[in-house]
Image: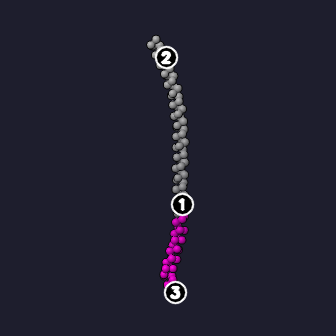
């Protein structure tokens, strides 16, 4: 009996108690960590979706900007031609 009490109150008992506490903590913490990580994952998914929308909108803006610059170039060419014609009439 003394050996059993000595084992329970000695290093073996401390090891058994530590393992039991670790198992209990694991059962308590794992569900909390899972729910936390799931919420973080959802938040990251929302941020990635918003970033993809921003990139898509930027691409559309760039296409519109390029088209507008092309039209502006054509308009400037017409204005230059008109000014050249007016200059010819005034000088001649």
Query: What is the number of the mark on residue 35?
Result: 1
For disc 3, the marked residue is 3
Q: Marks 3 and 1, how far apart in space?
A: 45 Å
Q: Which residue is more in the foreground, 77 or 64?
A: 77
Q: Is residue 88 above or below residue 67?
A: above
Q: Residue at x 48, y 22 (%)?
A: 80
Q: Is residue 50 above or below residue 5?
A: above
Secondary structure at numbered mark 1:
helix
Residue sitting at the far top: 92
Look at discs 1 and 2 and give the one toward the viewer.
2
Secondary structure at numbered mark 3:
helix
Q: Marks 1 and 2, how far apart in space?
A: 75 Å
Look at discs 3 and 1 and give the one toward the viewer.
3
Prevailing secondary structure class for the magenta stretch in the rendered image = helix
Dot 1, crowdedness within 10 Å: few (<14), some or many (≥20)? few
x and y, in percent, of residue 30 in the image:
54, 65
Span shown in magenta: 4-31
x and y, in percent, of residue 72 in the image:
51, 28
x and y, in percent, of residue 64 in the image:
53, 34
Q: Marks 3 and 2, how far apart in space?
A: 117 Å
Quick one: label 3 or label 1, which is nearer the N terminus?
Answer: 3
Q: Residue at x 54, y 54 (%)?
A: 42
For disc 2, the marked residue is 85
Dot 2, crowdedness within 10 Å: few (<14), some or many (≥20)? few
Q: Residue at x 52, y 88 (%)?
A: 1
Quick one: label 3 or label 2, which is nearer the N terminus?
Answer: 3
x and y, in percent, of residue 75 in the image:
51, 25
Which quadrant of the structure image shows residue 63? top right
Secondary structure at numbered mark 2:
helix
């Amino acid at each position: 009996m003394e050996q059993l009490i000595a084992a329970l109150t000695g290093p073996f008992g401390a090891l058994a108690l530590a393992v039991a506490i670790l198992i209990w903590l694991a059962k308590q913490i794992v569900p909390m960590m899972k729910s936390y990580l799931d919420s973080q994952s959802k938040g990251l998914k929302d941020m990635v979706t918003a970033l993809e929308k921003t990139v898509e909108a930027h691409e559309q803006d760039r296409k519109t900007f390029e088209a507008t610059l092309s039209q502006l170039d054509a308009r400037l060419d017409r204005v230059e031609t008109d000014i050249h014609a007016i200059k010819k009439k005034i000088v001649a």
